[in-house]
Amino acid sequence: MQTGSEGAANGRRSFLGKITLGAFAAAFLGQGWTYLRALVPNIKYEPPKKFKVGSPVEFAEGINFIESKGLFIIREGSQYSSISAKCTHLGCTVKYAPLQHAQTVKVGGREITEKYEFHCPCHGSKFRQNGMPYSGPAPSSLPWHKLEIAPEDGQLVVDISTSVDSDFRITI
Amino acid sequence: MKKDKIIKTDKIIFAVAGLLFAAITFATIVKDNVPEWKYYQSEFKYIAAEVAAEEAVSKIPSGIQQIWVEDLDRVDRCVTCHQGIFWPGLENKEQPYATHPQMSLFNDHPPEKYGCTICHGGQGYAVDYISAHGFVKFWEEPLLAGAVASDYNISEKAALLETNCNVCHRYERETKGMPFINHAKDLIQEKACWGCHVINGEGGTIGPELNHIGEKHPENFDWTNFSGFRSAFNWHLQHFDEPAQIVPGTVMPKMGLQTRDRQALALLMMSWKDENLPTKYIPGFRQKEQLRPEESSKRQELLAGDGAFFIEKGCFVCHSIKAFGIKSPTEKGPDLTFALDDTRVRFRQTLQEFVFDPTQSGTMSIIFSTKIILTDEEKWELINILTKANHEYKKNQNNNQ
C-alpha cells in the first residue's frame, strides 16, 4: 500500500530525476557542440581569398594578366570576368594564347566560339577559352572566380574561394 | 530512514550540478557567439547606410576580417571592428567606425603591404577592445594613441606614432609628417651625439652604441637612482635631463634640453629597434658593392674635380676625356677633350651652338632629349668645362713639346 506522502515523494523523485537527466543531456550535447565547433577555425593565418585588384576602368579591353595573384581579368565592354592562370596539373602559370581565327568548338556538349585559349608552358596542357582542358595532363578546368565590387571604393574584388560558372559576368 | 535522506540530498545535489553544468555550457556557447566585434559590425551597417547605397551596405563583409602581410609576418584583424577605415565620408564618426584620418598615407603605404600594427602598435591577432589595443600583460607594443601619450605627458597626440614611422624611416634625415622625430634628428646633429655613440652603424665608441637601443627592455635599465614610473621612455627622459644623476660617474654631459627636446629624443631612442624588415621597407637603406681599394680610389679620383661632371651625367660611358684622365669603357664617341674643335669640323657649329641645338648629330640629339637631359645652367657648365679642358690640354701639349 502506498500512502499519500510516499506517492508525492515518488513523484518528486521522478521529477528530480528527469531534470537531472535533462540537464546533463543538454550539457553534454552543448559541450560536444563546443568541441566540434573548436575544430573549425574562425579565421586562418593565410593570404586573403578575397582581394581588390584595382578600379574597373583601369583594365584594358580583353585579357589582363595579374601576375601577383596568378589570374586573368577579362573585360568585354562593361562586363568583367576572372579566370585562374594556375594550371590544374602542377600549378604553372598558363599563357594567354590568342587564336589567329576565331573557331567554334564543341565543349561538353555545347558549342562555343573561341578567340583565344590558355596554354601551359610546363607540360603542354591546353585549355579552351572557357577553361576546359582538351590536351595534355591537366585533369580539370581552370576555375573561374567570383567578382564583386568593393562597397567602399568601387574597386573590383576577386573572390578566389568561390568558383563560378564560366558564364559568370559582372556588369559595371 | 537515515539512508533514504542521504540519497535524497545526493539527488538534489546531483540535479543542481547538472543544471549548473548546463547553464555554464549554455553561457559558453552564447559568449562565443556574441563577441564584441559582432556588435560593432552590426552598428557599422547603420552608419555606412548614411553615406552609401543600400546595395553597397548589403555587401559589407561580416565575420572576422584581417589584413595579412607576408613580408612583415603580421596579420592585423583591426579591420574586423574598424570597418570604416577605407570609407570616405565617415571622417567625423566615432571610433571604431571612422574613416582613416590620413587616407593619403595609403598611397605610399598600401594597407595590404603594411597592415595596421606596424605603424599604430597594438596586438593584430586580437579581436576584443582591450587585447587588440595591446593594453594587456606581456604585449609590449600598445596602441600608440592618445591614452599612452597622455600617460607620458606628450601634448601632441600623434607624436608617439612617429616612433613607429621611424622604425622604417630611421636612415632618412628628414621625413614629411614626422615633426617630433625630425626635431630629434636635428638635435642629434646639433649636439653631435655621434661623437660618442654609434648611431645607425656609425659613430664614436666613448658611449654605448645606440643602433638598437629601442629594443632594450625596462628590466635591463639601471633604476637605482631613478624615481617615478619605470618605463624605458621615462628613463630616457630623466637621463637626458640629468645624465649624471641617473648614471653616476657617466661622462655624458648635460645638454640643457627642454621638455619637448627630451621627449623627442626619447621617442627617437624608442624607435631604434631591431625590427626584422625587408630592405625594401627601409627608405634610404642602400646596399653598397664592395670595391677593391684601387678601384675605390680610382672612383674617388674620377668623382673629384672637373671630370666629375662627365661621370655623374654618364657621358663617360661613350666618351673618353683625356684631359681629365677619363677612359670610356666603350669609346663609342669621340674624345670630348677635342669637342671644341670637333663640333666646328663635323657640324659646322660652335660648341655652344651644338650643345643647345644638337640636331646635326642624330645620336646626340636623342641622348640630349631623352637620356641626359641638361638644364641651361648645366649646358653652360658643360661648355665652360670643355673649353677649359681643351685649352689646358693644348697648353700642356705645347709645353711638353
Image (cartoon, rainbow, N blue to C red):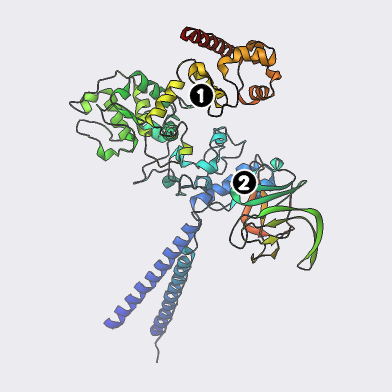
Q: Are marks 2 and 1 in contact (CB under 8 Å)?
A: no
| Residue at the image point whose x is 60% and y is 42% from the top | B47
Amino acid identity at mark 1: Lys
Amino acid identity at mark 2: Lys
Residue B155 appears anywhere in the view:
no
Residue B36: image location, x then y, percent: 49, 50
Q: Quadrant of the N terminus of chain B?
A: bottom left
Q: Dot 2 corresponds to which residue?
A: A52
From the image, state whether disc 2 or disc 1 is nearer to you: 1
Residue A39: image location, x then y, percent: 47, 64
Q: Secondary structure at mark 2?
A: strand
| Residue sitting nearer the eye, A149 or B112 | B112
| Residue B225 lies in quadrant | top left
- Tag 2: Cα neighbours inside 10 Å, few (<14), some, or many (≥20)? some
Residue A38: image location, x then y, percent: 46, 63
| Residue B199 lies in quadrant | top left
**Disc number for residue A45:** none
